[in-house]
Image (cartoon, rainbow, N blue to C red):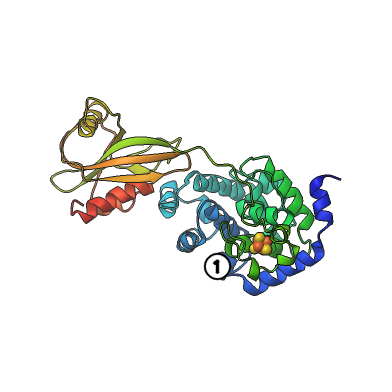
Amino acid sequence: MNALEEKMKQKDIDKFREDLITWFEREQRILPWRENQDPYRVWVSEVMLQQTRVETVIPYFRRFVEQFPTVSALAEADEEKVLKAWEGLGYYSRVRNLQSAVKEVHERYGGVVPAEEKEFGGLKGVGPYTKGAVLSIAYNKPIPAVDGNVMRVMSRILSIWDDIAKPKTRTIFEQAVSAFISHEKPSEFNQGLMELGAIICTPKSPSCLLCPVQKHCSAFAEGTERELPVKSKKKKPGIKTMAAVVLTDDQGDVYIHKRPPKGLLANLWEFPNTETQKGIKTEREQLEAYLEKEMGTTAEIGELEGIVEHVFTHLVWNISVFFGKVKQVSDTTEFIRVTKEELEEYAFPVSHQKIWKMAEESGRL
Ligand code: SF4
């Protein structure tokens, strides 16, 4: 018997399940994706909730399922419209993978989200967490759904000191949740663990006195709840300095361009911008050189208007923002010219939405 099995043996697992599920059924928050068990809606919500807070997700979820209410609606939707509906949620590869996977469901499985692990888990972007979450919540399958929240809760319950930042640690927690999960109510069990992690067993100050599973918790008994889970620090993100310009012409039309189809923020739209280096040339000169050499555009660029910072997981963008008037544009430029009203139809990453807002507030757009 290994150390984990030894720890689990000391727990009254039946009572733990009962306490957790009873609490969840009584206390769960009313959330739009809990209105029914439609697997498509559960799936959309789980994808949105990765890396994003519940409060942020709620309005996005409502709009998204209103616009794309079924598998077929999303499968057949124009990618541009899907990205627009996701605009601001970030991590756009999530929605691209979701749409590819939904297309496969539409074509191969007649629009019905597959209930089998092998089939659902084989879809694009569906990792072990999403698989467990969707199949347990929508189809009542007793499959673990282990994310950071669940690792935090279970590390405290069982006093597990392995580093949760290491990918291989997840298997320890999957093993633990597999042993604990209810076979009668796997949906309520998994949601109960998630809910407990979200509202009671929080990272910095867990509310142990209100906790429904306190008497099962090793960390509470040992007074180590604030030391767990062990999570090694990530490397500091790199910083990229950039300059961007909101370019308009005499009619007030705006110049934008599309990012490449692969890589970070693929296929989203943005204002003209370039990476800058410290050195002999000013940011404005570097921006002018970029416009002229790479985009066949000459422009009169004003003073620095402000800085926009955007933090990705491993990278920070520090963007100096300028406003400018177009003088000449070559026919071969990659820019497109749009009216202010048309701008609303294009999906921009958050950093460029901030630039847009800056231009609106200063009356340039
Ligand atoms: Fe978390 Fe405290 Fe409950 Fe243990 S007793 S599960 S540390 S909230």
- The picture quadrant where one finds residue 328 is top left
- The picture quadrant where one finds residue 254 is top left
Horizontally, residue 119 falls left or right of residue 247, namely right
Asked if the beta carbon under badge 1 is closer than 8 A to the nearest atom of ligand 1, the reply is no
The image shows residue 321 at horizontal and vertical percentages of 25, 43
Residue at point 80%, 61% (across, down)? 13
Q: Is residue 280 visible?
A: yes
The image shows residue 323 at horizontal and vertical percentages of 20, 43
Q: Residues within 10 Å of mark 1 (few under 14, many from 20)?
A: few
Judging by the rendered image, the residue that carries numbered circle 1 is 31
What residue occupies the far right of the structure in this picture? 1
Instruction: In the rendered view, tell whether residue 213 sits above or below residue 179.
Output: below
Of residue 161 and residue 169, the one placed in the foreground of this image is 161
Residue at point 80%, 52% (across, down)? 7
- The picture quadrant where one finds residue 9 is bottom right
The image shows residue 66 at horizontal and vertical percentages of 47, 63
Residue at point 74%, 54% (across, down)? 158
Residue type marked 1: Leu
Horizontally, residue 358 falls left or right of residue 219, namely left
What residue occupies the far front of the structure in this picture? 223
Q: Is residue 114 visible?
A: no
The image shows residue 298 at horizontal and vertical percentages of 17, 32
Instruction: In the rendered view, tell whether residue 31 sits above or below residue 233.
Output: below
Of residue 355 and residue 72, the one placed in the foreground of this image is 355
Instruction: Count the numbered circles shown.
Output: 1
Tell which quarter ligand 1 is in. bottom right
Quarter of the image with the N terminus is top right
Q: Secondary structure at mark 1?
A: loop
